[in-house]
Image (tube, rainbow, N blue to C red):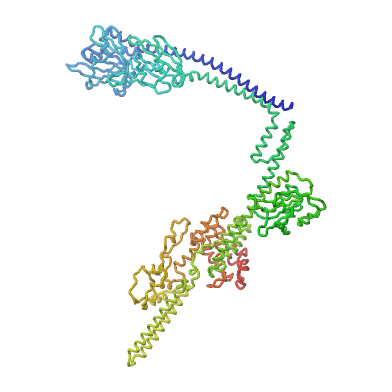
Amino acid sequence: MSIKKNVQFYIYIAYFFTGLILLFGIAMGTVQFTRMSKIILAQADSSYSLIGNEVASNVKDIYEPVKNQTEILAQSHPISGKNLNERLAHVNYLAKSIISVKSATSAYVGFADGEFFLLRQYAKSNGNNEVFKAPEKTAWIVQSTSLETGKMLEHVVYLDDRLNEISRQQIPLRNYDPRQRGWYENAMKNPDMANVSEPYYFFTTGQIGVTYAQKIVGVDAVVGIDIELPTIHETIKNSSVTPSTSIALIDRKGQLLAWKNGKQATYKPQIVTKLDGTQSMPTLAEQDAPVLNKVRELTGSAGSISQTLDVMGQTWATYQANIQIPGGQDLHILIASPHHELLADVIKMRQQTIMLFLVMLVIGVGVTIYFSRLASKPLKQLNDEASKIARFDFQSPINIQSRIREIADLTHSMRGMKATIRSFIDIAGSLASETNYDKLLARVLKEMSEITDAKSGILYLYQPQDQSMQVVQVYVDHQVLESDAQRIAMDDEEHPVIQACKSRSSICQLQVADLPRFFSALPATNHVTTLIAIPLKDRNNILVGAIALVIDDADIDPGRQAMAEAVSGAAAIAIENQRLIQEQKALLEAFIQLIASAIDAKSPYTGGHCQRVPVLTKLLAQAACKETEGTFAGFQLNDAEWEELHIAAWLHDCGKVTTPEYIVDKATKLETLYDRIHEIRMRFEVLKRDAQIDYWQAVANDSAGNDAAELKKKLDDTIAQLDSDFAFLAECNEGGEFMAPDKIARIQGIAGRQWLRTLSDRIGISHDEKERKNRTTEPALPVQEQLLSDKTEHIFTRSPRDTIAADNPWGFKVKVPQHLYNRGEVYNLTVARGTLSEEERYKINEHMIQTIMMLEKLPFPRHLAKVPEIAGGHHEKMDGTGYPKRLTGADMSIPARMMAIADIFEALTAADRPYKKGKTLSEAIKIMSFMKKDQHIDAELFALFLRSGAYLEYGKIFMNPEQIDEFDIRAYL
């Protein structure tokens, strides 16, 4: 118990010190942040006062000198003279006034008669470049409106820095009357002092500013000096406490003279025309400045005010104060800064303090945890081991040491659990990965024997046909042996294995005499042994088999028995899966061979072709796999690829099921379902009868008998010619290597003969034939017809279903005849070679198209995916002239090229074809050598075919002895 208290104490101390450090840090941080915030806010108030005083001083520095200079100019008439030239002589007075006042941009005099004289310092005024387009070296600009010879004239004069004239321009008179300007009117109303105007647009430059103006003493004129508002804006441009600080300078009406809104673009003063036509500067209330407007609402009667406001979800420090303007109304300055910027340094310091505190906290917690984990380390290791088990990581054993008894016991239990789970997963994985059925059975028996530490064992498989358990494997002396021991009938109630199969796994004692009685396949012993009988049942609880394990020990470890029972379920499923796979493969194999046999049995012209080609293909593939050098040194086939080649070879001509038998078996040119030469023979018989009838009619009409001999000769000549012509047609019908042009001409000549048909050929026939005949109008009977003809009804049209498009998805590149069939008699008799017309030859070759289309529709598993390619390429040629895809050798796989050689060799040497005699070995090889030279077959595979002796091995199995002759293969290598 003391050890448990110590472990809990360390954990408790860790929590206690962690909480204490955390509480101390929070308290210190709160106090420090509060005090520093107050200090910073107090400094902000001080900064606001300084900014306010500075702005007030700057504004006075702008206004005061201008006011004083205006009063000085008003005391002395600065511009005298009656015209422009006389007034230019006194321009230096105005120039000195502008130079002496930094904020002044221009000085001018407005006369009571409407004349006007203005001097502008070119460098100070904004917008001069665009308005005046002054010449180079211009320093001063004079704008003058003067009365010359009773007429008002307006001039612009450009002066250099020494007030020397550069150029002068007379410009069109503008509607500018100084007497109508506000500054003139205010000065006349208050002649004793300098008056400052409200902001307005300057007439010439378009800039906004204010004007100080005063009536000149003793003269009916007003002198004025301009100040542009951008100059006033400069007073607050660089005044800021934080980046987001807002500062505004407004007059008594709230009009904005200068405004800096944090990080936003600089405010540009402008006059706003209202709906009533009056003009004024924008007011602060019209701007997006909620904080400054809130500050303005709190304006006091006098002095400055500092306050804290909450606006827009933020806390702001604010300041406001009045600025006195000489000769005018007071201005008002407003300042606002967000707290989070004012306190940025404090917040940063707080964050640094927090980080330092966290570092110290982590260090303190780390030290505390280090000592507390000394006691909990074994538990952590056990937790890690449990996580490894959850991730199925069984690589390392569990080696954890602890002085705590409970932890030590838990370690021992987890070590056993890990070993058991690992063993189970390894066994289940090995059983599931085994694809060889016999090896799987052996592995099941061996694994179960080793789990239970059995000395021997027997594996039974249930045979539902005869209701028995068949012995298939025996385990003795750590080896698995096959056995054909006697079966156990399921009705043998005394046998312990049968008893287990009808209930569940059982354990029993075997006496010395019981072992040879029940398990004769196992070696006898001279002592009592223990038997574990475990039934093997699949996922549906259906009996698959059973295992009998014989153990020398009298006592059985319950854990081993439980492990064996658990593994038995996985073993039963693995056995059942493999048995199903074997049965499915056997079914597929039988079905494939059924199709091939049906094709071979369909016509004697194919014989056993589909059964022999697979054998020869495999012989050639085995030869390639044995090569250790050369092109095929790296060629190997795994079990899946052998299966793929086997299926492809058996199905390589499966498309022949779609080829009509009468085309495959067509022995003569006129043969369809029957040989139409018989129809033609009957027509010749009719012509012969007609000739005899004509002869006897002529004899009857020749009563004197004068022409009897001539008539008889004519009859004999006609009969002889008809017999000769029919014999010629019968010979042509048999087909041959070549049809000479003279023979074709003779056939066409014979076709020109006519015979008389008196019966309708459109009755008693099939619907399809009647449809073909109805393409033409039936002539009136009797009708003369040609002896041989190519009629419209002989044409079988090709439907879209029988057409192969150029862009077909299979990649076929074949020339499709226009018609499906052409049964024309002349057309077929004049076939140049053999007995097949173009349409019929295409139909024969079409079996390859059908083969590929049929195979590609089948859902082959992934390891059989190349079956269509291998099976469908045996009529392709290396030079790309084959069919149906015109593939070259580079486009074909090696197995497909092998099958092409096997297909040709079998066709040449087959001795069971009724239309030809099988070639000898030498004849077949010679023909294939020519095909090799013409690049019809793969040259390297043909050489391997000869070198390996595959041709001879095949010949000994399938060829007649007289076909196997001697020849030198070196002539073809």
Quadrant assignment for the C terminus: bottom right
Q: Is residue 723 above or below residue 868?
A: below
- Would residue 638 be visible to someone looking at this image? no
Residue 797, horizontal then vertical, whole percent: 41, 65
Residue under the point 62% across and 60% down: 622
In the picture, measured across the screen, residue 858 lies left or right of residue 487, that is left
Residue under the point 36% across and 67% down: 775
Observer-nearest of 199 and 297: 297
In the picture, measured across the screen, residue 241 lies left or right of residue 251, that is right
Q: How many marks do you count on the picture?
A: 0
- Would residue 280 be visible to someone looking at this image? yes
In the picture, measured across the screen, residue 431 lies left or right of residue 761, that is right
Given the current orientation, which residue lies at the most extreme left position? 150
Q: Is residue 623 above or below residue 110?
A: below
Given the current orientation, which residue lies at the most extreme right position? 526
Q: Quadrant of residue 560?
A: top right
Residue 971, horizontal then vertical, whole percent: 59, 67
Observer-nearest of 863 and 103: 863
Q: Is residue 803 above or below residue 566?
A: below
Residue 468, horizontal then vertical, whole percent: 69, 57
In the picture, measured across the screen, residue 101 lies left or right of residue 180, that is right
Q: Is residue 261 above or below residue 621?
A: above
Residue 919, horizontal then vertical, whole percent: 56, 71
Residue under the point 61% across and 73% down: 962
Quadrant assignment for the N terminus: top right
